[in-house]
Amino acid sequence: MKILVTVKRVVDYNVKVRVKSDGSGVDIANVKMSMNPFDEIAVEEAVRLREAGVATEVVAVSCGVTQCQETLRTALAIGADRGILVESAEELQPLAVAKILKALVDKEQPQLVILGKQAIDDDSNQTGQMLAALAGLPQATFASKVVVANGKATVSREVDGGAETLSLKLPAVVTTDLRLNEPRYVTLPNIMKAKKKPLETLKPADLGVDVAPRLKTVKVAEPPKRSAGVMVPDVKTLVEKLRNEAKVL
Ligand code: AMP
């Protein structure tokens, strides 16, 4: 069984992003870039399934600029077997990525596609869902547990007030939540080994995909600054302020 797993190169989660002065987006020049944290979880889960003998091959895919090769090398160091870079200098919106992934699903015929639930840069939470729709595959989003057996994936997901368990016939699409697993540390020997693993580069046109953006960003703005807090002398004043000023009581 082959697993396709997606890895997006995003601004590292520790970086405090700054909005460009013209409001056209955020400044990513000279900023540390890393693998999207939910995608690390996706790679970890795929590699665990291969280590458990459930899967035979893990193929990592990244779409974007040439430097996404580094993100793919990290996936290979976690344990993926080979990488595919779909290289494009254009801004790739979720629909474009989903179309690319649909073409790769047709080409590679994986039994399972594991994506992050959301990319921490655009916070779209759309790609997995769009891929499932385009490819006509069942989907389980926000997975906190995945069990694969007898041609089925059994996926637990957190819902309001409890956990929901879904059964999906393979091939299927799963997106990862934070609770699914804790990704392993990448060791130096594995980073060295990853350098020798195969990494193929394709262009969207090779897959017959038009990646032209369908959305235009009108404006990006900093969140409003928080105003300073006030110390209140006693509970009575607090309740009074909550009732008469904040009007939350
Ligand atoms: P999004 O819909 O943008 O929030 O992204 C959801 C998930 O789709 C991410 O966690 C990735 O697994 C995958 N994904 C989105 N964009 C890309 C990309 N450019 N390359 C690889 N995977 C991506």
Image (cartoon, rainbow, N blue to C red):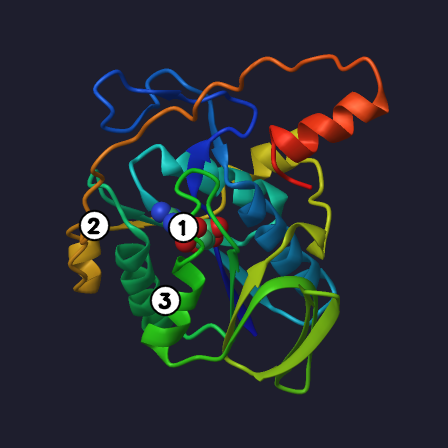
Question: According to the image, label 1 marks what residue?
Answer: 124
Query: For numbered disc 2, what is the local secondary structure?
Result: loop
In the image, 97: left or right of 164? left
Point out residue 53 in the picture as x, y percentages from the top left corner: 71, 69
The label nearer to you, 2 versus 3, is 2
Q: Classify the position of the C terminus by image quarter.
A: top right
Point out residue 188 in the picture as x, y percentages from the top left corner: 65, 29
In this rendering, the answer to whether 61 lies above or below 131 is above
Q: Classify the position of the N terminus by image quarter.
A: bottom right
Q: Is mark 1 within 8 Å of ligand 1?
A: yes
In this rendering, the answer to whether 30 lies above or below 84 is above
Q: Residue at x 44, y 79 (%)?
A: 137
First in sequence: mark 1 or mark 3?
Answer: 1
First in sequence: mark 1 or mark 2?
Answer: 1
Q: Amino acid at mark 1?
A: Ser
Q: Is mark 2 within 8 Å of ligand 1?
A: no
In the image, 156: left or right of 104? right
Q: Residue at x 68, y 65 (%)?
A: 160
Contact check, label 1 and label 3, Cβ < 8 Å? no
Q: Is mark 3 within 8 Å of ligand 1?
A: yes
In this rendering, the answer to whether 66 lies above or below 62 is above
Query: For numbered disc 1, what is the local secondary structure?
Result: loop
Label 1 neighbourhood size at 10 Å, few (<14), some (14-19), many (20+)? Answer: few
Determine if residue 155 is in view.
yes
In the image, 114: left or right of 18? right
Label 2 neighbourhood size at 10 Å, few (<14), some (14-19), many (20+)? Answer: few
Give residue 215's mark.
2
Q: Residue at x 28, y 50 (%)?
A: 93
The CA distance from mark 1 to mark 3 is: 11 Å
Question: According to the image, label 3 marks what residue?
Answer: 130
Q: Amino acid at mark 3?
A: Met
The CA distance from mark 1 to mark 2 is: 12 Å
